Image (cartoon, rainbow, N blue to C red):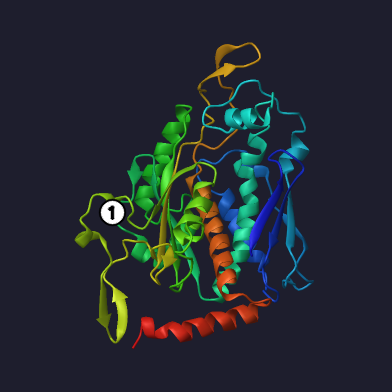
Amino acid sequence: MIRLTTAGESHGEYIVGILEGIPSHLKINIDFINKKLYLRKKGYGRSERMKFEEDKFEIFSGIDENFVTTGAPIGFRVLNIDFLINKTKRYSTSPRPGHVDYSGSVKFDFENFYLSSERRSGRLTVLDTIAGAICETLLNELGIKVYFSVISIGKIKIEENIIDKIENLFEEILSSDLFIPIKEIEEKMKKEIDKAKSRGDTLGGSSVIVVKNIPPGIGDYNNYLENLDGLLSQAVISVPSVKAVEIGDGVLSSILFGSEFHDEFFISDNKIKRKTNRCGGIEGGVSNGEDIVIKIYSKPIPTLMKGLKTVDFENFVEIESKYVRSDILAIPAVTLVAASRISIVLANEIKKKFGGDTIFDLKNSFNNYLNSRRRFWQK
């Protein structure tokens, strides 16, 4: 089983991850991980912390001197530069609306409302990004590719469907400050971010993640806990700020007739194909061989410069929440983290299905499966 366990806090000295279940002999590309970490930090509207956090990671177990996995748990850690700069203790007697401050403090009986946010902070998604990059490396060995793009920020959105073009547009997407492949729309979005900042406000947005070359048969329909769409949805909606997840055209499905929505089969050049992919590559909790398409919707960051109404629990009076340094917008980083979580889930599902102590064993089993099932998509 491939599983990520984390430790550490947003303003602690280190954040630490342990990634279990990665087979041996997988070559880890350090540059690939660093690129993902860089993409997570960049973005228009990010907080000042992104400018000084270096996100340098150290892998201290599970790989050899040539950066090849050994089959043991992969341990890694990242130093928080903020800890070195600001060593003052954070304490608050008033919860910030939209954060975990209140609900987490009730759960664990904290007087300090900041304690819960130390673990729910977006800072810890650095660990998801590192683990996701390792899992994406495993997926790439099998020819599986993960793409993503921001679709909307506030009320401004890309009107055209870019899902079918996302592979060709991906370099443009990655070079954009907002993961937007259309320059004119990106500029409109930046102006909207500037407007929100001048008002002391924040913005949310939406995005799409597309996974290509996943074979049919991943996931399980026998137990709802093993449904692939359920596993992916849980992993994505638990990313900080994500409030809704859509598989394929899930929202549209609620207003269409069945004859309009479902993905019909047809034959072309002795191959079985689909006319559409409205189900987003998953039917009955199992992948069907089409692209997996997941759309996510992120709320505005709940820390506003102008503050929100709250209560000081020490004096039991109504006050405005205190401003704590934060982003104006986080949807680009949220999208990358969601894609990382998706890579972890898919790597785990593939490892469960095909097994293998080494990457060679896993690839052989994977290819044998494809050969044994080829009659389902090709005469």
Question: Residue at 40% across / 39% down in the picture?
Answer: 191
Can residue 341 be seen by looking at this rendering? Answer: yes
Camera-side residue: 326 or 290? 290
Residue 369 vs 188, above or below: the answer is: below
* Quarter of the C terminus within the rendering: bottom left
Can residue 324 be seen by looking at this rendering? Answer: no
Question: Residue at 53% across / 53% down in the picture?
Answer: 235
Question: Residue at 55% across / 61% down in the picture?
Answer: 345
Question: Residue at 65% across / 20% down in the picture?
Answer: 93
Camera-side residue: 151 or 76? 76
Residue matched to label 1: 253
Q: Quadrant of residue 365?
A: bottom right
Q: Position of residue 70 (x, y in %)?
A: 75, 72
Label 1 Cα crowd, 10 Å radius (few <14 / some 14-19 / many 20+): some
Indicate left or right for 195 with 161 as reference. right
* Secondary structure category for the residue under label 1: helix
Indicate left or right for 79 with 4 as reference. right
Residue 219 vs 152, above or below: the answer is: below
Residue 89 vs 142, above or below: the answer is: above
Q: Position of residue 152 (x, y in %)?
A: 38, 47
Camera-side residue: 36 or 318? 318
Q: Quadrant of residue 274?
A: bottom left
Camera-side residue: 184 or 41? 41
